[in-house]
Image (cartoon, rainbow, N blue to C red):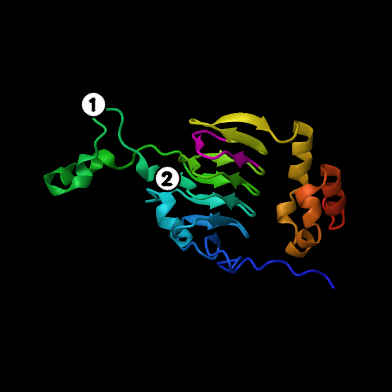
Amino acid sequence: MQPLPADPTVLHPMPEHPRVVLLKPLVKSPLIEVGDYSYYDDPDDPTAFETRNVLYHYGPERLVIGKYCALGTGTRFIMNGANHRMDGPSTFPFPTMGGSWAEHFDLITGLPGRGDTLVGNDVWFGHGATVMPGVRIGHGAIVAAGAVVTGDVPDYGIVGGNPARLIRTRFDAADVARLLAVAWWDWPVRHVTEHVRTIMSGTVADLEEAAARIGRS
């Protein structure tokens, strides 16, 4: 009998650990898109992810997180709504305080933004990682605990620090290209289930062999 995959629509995939939630069935904002099986772990209130971990999200920029991503406690995404004017003597947003200051609201509209924040598939965020607006994080990347990501992260890159710097890549360029071609995260979930051990601990060649069984080169 073929093993059954985990259910991507269940909010708490580990009922004995309510601190873990799958994000796809949790998020409601049309500006947030999350792939299957990506999860957030928080001992306090993981269900508050949209309000506590996606900050200053006033739109229209989107947050897109791929499949099979692991988000440690306190992972936060700062969105473009956090931006202030920096071209004058003061950065204080007077018009947001109301009163007669609100007459100058045009001073804080149309501020430059960096666009959507995009996270690839199979990305691991360590405890307390922070991602700044408009960042692109590649497939298979690792963001170290406490890192502040201000720039793009390459596929299978490991970054850490404040601001985050590339520490190393997990594979050489040739193997990264092979892994991207395999794209195991796009396999049918039953095929993923059948090859979990290969995905977690096999070689790139092993993954390619498994991919060939479903017609992926």
Q: Along the horizontal axis of the image, is 96 left or right of 111?
A: left
In the image, residue 88 above or below residue 170: above
- Graded by Cα atoms within 10 Å as few (under 14), some (14 to 19) or many (20 or more), the crowding at tag 1 reads few
Is residue 145 part of the magenta span, yes or no? yes
Report x, y in % for residue 128: 49, 44
- Graded by Cα atoms within 10 Å as few (under 14), some (14 to 19) or many (20 or more), the crowding at tag 2 reads many
Residue at image coords 76%, 43%: 179
Q: Nearer the viewer, residue 49 or 19?
A: 19
Q: Along the horizontal axis of the image, is 213 left or right of 184?
A: right
Quadrant of the image occupied by residue 15: bottom right
Residue at image coords 54%, 55%: 40
In the image, residue 6 above or below residue 119: below
The residue tagged 1 is 89
Report x, y in % for residue 25: 54, 66
**How many numbered marks does the figure carry?**
2
Residue at image coords 60%, 68%: 9
The residue tagged 2 is 79
Local secondary structure at mark 2: loop
User: Disc number at residue 146?
Assistant: none
Q: Along the horizontal axis of the image, is 57 left or right of 206?
A: left
Q: Nearer the viewer, residue 162 or 138?
A: 162
Where does the magenta region start and end? 141-152
Report x, y in % for residue 60: 42, 50
Mark 2: which amino acid?
A: Met
Quadrant of the image occupied by residue 138: top right
**Secondary structure predominantly adopted by residues drawn in magenta:** loop
Residue at image coords 56%, 44%: 126
Mark 1: which amino acid?
A: Pro
**Distance between mark 1 and mark 2 Cα atoms:** 24 Å
Is residue 118 part of the magenta span, yes or no? no
